Amino acid sequence: MKFFIDTANVDDIRKANDMGVICGVTTNPSLIAKEGRDFNEVIKEITSIVDGPISGEVKATTVDAEGMIKEGREIAAIHPNMVVKIPMTVEGLKAVKVLSAEGIKTNVTLIFTANQALLAAEAGATYVSPFLGRLDDISQPGIGLIEDIVTIFDNYGYDTEIIAASIRNPIHVTDCALAGADIATVPYKVIEQMTKHPLTDAGIEKFQADYRAVFGD
Ligand code: E4P
């Protein structure tokens, strides 16, 4: 499974990139707004840090296909690695069809059912983003959605890649890898949590103590 980082914070992106574990970035309107920076400025900076797919979403207030297509072309023109993130709506699907025919990569977001993923793949989406955590939040097991989409895409040989999104903890990541998601997009905090185990810390302390006892610092 590949990892993207789910943030618009360039410090977190740099830290994760330096660890060598991420090969892409996803942003959304809330994440961009949290940084309080101009969309184009922050996206350009991200493309200078990570050499891989960078998802930038059309404006949250743009709901018609025509507007999404126009913005999608502008986002794609920022850098060859740009992926246009489009919400899962009828208008969104129309925009995906046009943009993918032009060779522009798309990521259909806010996927909460297998049928939505199936439609997005048929429309030509490069990626679909099923939201695991937000389903868990309303007591619907999100991992079942990832498993269903993996099975359906395998059944029909879709090239569309599954980005498991709305990841809230390390267990989500393991579950997505077991389910066969192509990619997990993970906040920096969860990447950090994934590096930890109390026995690793205890082991490091013991090695240091044993070494120091004989050789000093
Ligand atoms: C996906 O690309 C979204 O940016 C993200 O994973 C949403 O996560 P959240 O539900 O924690 O906001």
Image (cartoon, rainbow, N blue to C red):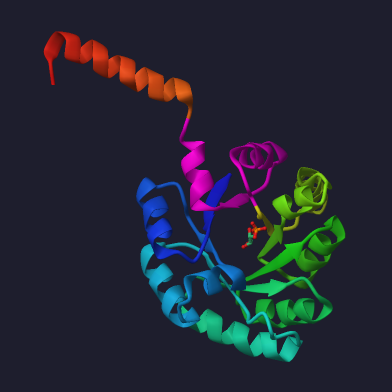
Q: Is residue 200 above or below residue 140?
A: above
Residue 52 placement (x, y as % from top left): 47, 62
Task: Say if the magenta span includes residue 172.
Answer: yes
Say which residue appears at 38% left-offset and 46% top-offset: 19
Q: Is residue 203 left or right of residue 193?
A: left
Q: Where residue 166 appears, x then y in whole percent?
A: 66, 54
**Which residue does the image show at 77% across and 67% down from the upper left?**
120
Quarter of the image containing the N terminus?
Answer: top right
| Horizontal relation, residue 189 to residue 119: left or right | left
Question: Is residue 210 depicted above or below 85 in this figure?
Answer: above
Region of the chain picked out in magenta, as a range: 167-196
**In the image, is 17 to the left or to the right of 107?**
left
Q: Is residue 104 above or below residue 6?
A: below
Q: Pinpoint residue 9: horizontal percent, then vertical percent.
A: 45, 64
| Residue 216, placed above or below residue 120 | above
* Residue 208: quadrant of the picture: top left
Q: Residue furthest right?
A: 115
Let me know if residue 28 appears in the view. Answer: no
Q: Position of residue 198 (x, y in %)?
A: 47, 24
Q: Quadrant of ligand 1?
A: bottom right
Task: Please check the rendered image and state whether residue 6 is part of the magenta-colored stretch, yes or no.
Answer: no
Q: Quadrant of the C terminus?
A: top left
- Quarter of the image where one finds residue 99: bottom right
